[in-house]
Image (cartoon, rainbow, N blue to C red):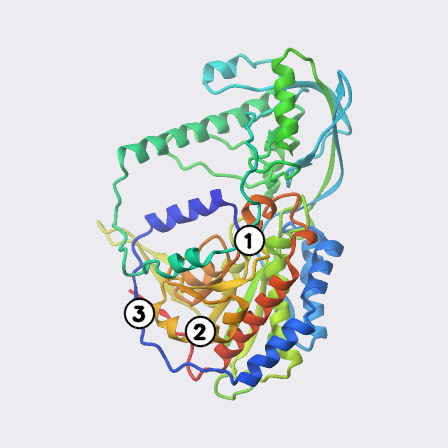
Amino acid sequence: MLQRKLLSVFLLYAFLLPTVAFGQAAAPASYQAPKDVIDKIKDEGTNRSQVMQTLSYLTDVIGARLTGSPQMKRANEWTRDQMAKWGLQNAKLEAWGPFGRGWTLKSFDAQVVAPYGIPLLAYPKAWSPSTKGAVTADVVYFNAKTDAELEKYKGQLRGKIVLISEPRSLKAVDAALSSRYTDEELTKLAAAPNPATDAPRPQQATPSPEQAQRFQQQQQQRAMAGKIMNFVLQEGAAVLLDNSRLGSGGTIFVSGATVAQDVPANPQDRPIRLSPQQKEAEAKMLPQMTVATEHYNRLVRMINQGEKLRMTVNIQAEYNDNDPMSYNTTAEIPGSDPKLKDEVVMLGGHMDSWHSSTGATDNAAGVAVAMEAVRILQTLGLKPRRTIRVGLWSGEEQGLFGSRAYVKQHFGEMQDTSAAAGQPAKRELVKKPEYEKLSAYYNLDNGTGKIRGVYQQGNAAVAPIFRSWLEPFKDMGATTLTLANTGGTDHLAFDAIGLPGFQFIQDEIEYDTRTHHSNQDNYDRLQADDMKQAATIMAAFVYQTAMMDEKIPRKAMR
Ligand SMILES: [Zn+2]
């Protein structure tokens, strides 16, 4: 799942886009698999599951899967080969891009060496440049919130190791780190209004004075952060340390390196932002790492007490430049009905991860569950009428890039039509022939928690279909349908062009508190029974979608 910050940017864009309203189509005749078929799916998924074996290989053996890295490519190839071994057809890699360069950490070492040795819990940020060997230098706490304060550091930072963020106060963790949906919460979710019809978006929302002020503050903070990054780069700092933005007790949340962005000479011009995976960004980044909050806070407190700290940092990483393209893995169970086999039902999740652990809950879980779902169907020899296709995406963490590229290549995209004189430009859906061939896409990317239901994404017509499909899984805890939207992951790529894309409702477990984007996102945080349940339900949903006389109803785009 995408970082919440990025997610809010997407939501903002969705908000600012010209209104794309969705009407509702009438529900087609559903298909209900016979009880013995559902029982077989349950039996295979529960008693002969391979989902944890798949997860161990993806996480323990292949490891972190940063988009563009050799490990990501290895995961692409391994999942392709594994699905081919299970008997799936057309197992292949599909290129998209260019994405940019990969990044592989070779070695890392960081500690305080004076006044005495203090080992640190820390990780380099993805795409951080290497240090020039082991750097031993004085540590400076950079505490500037205004231009005047910034000036005080002029000439003070060359060759120094710089603490760039503020300390973050921690409170005792008195709430459970792990949670599951209560009946009450699910009831509330089920009663959510239809985002497509019940809450029409105003064309141009006028922000309240508080919102406007908050927005202005955020803009100022962002502008200041941008200035600081340029300043420390120009001043020649050796290494930047920042504070884990969340977590405690050894959990560190680490993502991509920060790039110093050029400020346009004309403030009216839109800045061209560089991403850390772009080659041109390398000269605009300092070596940088994220430190566990308890350790970061202590360093700041020691400096504030007047202590002179020295640290040694050695970041050795390699950029992978030989292939700027990235890849999704796809594989199929071909359809058996001569009239319907050209139509497709898709399922999947993103395979790329951040790098400080092994991306177990974000999102080897979704990948392994989708693979297991098709393994169950393949093993049982069920012959779906439509083709079932798995899509394992990359570049999700940087902005749903892999699934968006796939949707654009296969199904279509929203394009700006040129505006007539005096008229605003319009967004228009430009379809590919495959657009009419897709029934639905099912995504799993909310961690290790079992499936509790489905987000309908404003599609009211699917309710009777999904309700009957959930019925045999009530005893496994999956009961809830909500009209509500959910975001932050790859079903949005399909939904954005009016194709039925769904994400399942999953128990939270430790997703936000501990695992997603942290150094603790490892195999041991995966819940085996939850993963088996999810694969079983996904298999049944995908199979039944492939067996219907008609496709899953779509939200009409107006
Ligand atoms: Zn994520």
Q: Residues within 10 Å of mark 1 (few under 14, many from 20)?
A: many
Q: Is mark 1 within 8 Å of ligand 1?
A: yes
Question: Which x, y percent locates residue 186?
Answer: 43, 59
Q: Is residue 462 visible?
A: no
Q: Amino acid at mark 2?
A: Pro
Question: What label does residue 396 carry, if any?
Answer: 1
Question: Which quadrant, please, contains the C terminus?
Answer: bottom left
The answer to which quarter of the image holds residue 198 is: bottom left
Of labels 2 and 3, earlier in sequence is 3
Question: Which x, y percent locates residue 351?
Answer: 62, 57
Marks 2/1: CA–CA distance: 25 Å
Give the residue displayed 56% in from the left and 86% down from the top. Answer: 336
User: Which type of secondary structure does the marked residue at label 1 adopt?
Assistant: loop
Is residue 375 placed above or below 501 in the rendered structure? Answer: below
Q: Identify the residue under disc 3.
A: 24
User: Which type of secondary structure does the marked residue at label 3 adopt?
Assistant: strand
Q: Identify the residue under disc 2.
A: 433
Q: Amino acid at mark 1?
A: Glu
Marks 2/3: CA–CA distance: 22 Å
Q: Amino acid at mark 3?
A: Gln
Q: Residues within 10 Å of mark 2 (few under 14, many from 20)?
A: few
Of labels 2 and 1, earlier in sequence is 1
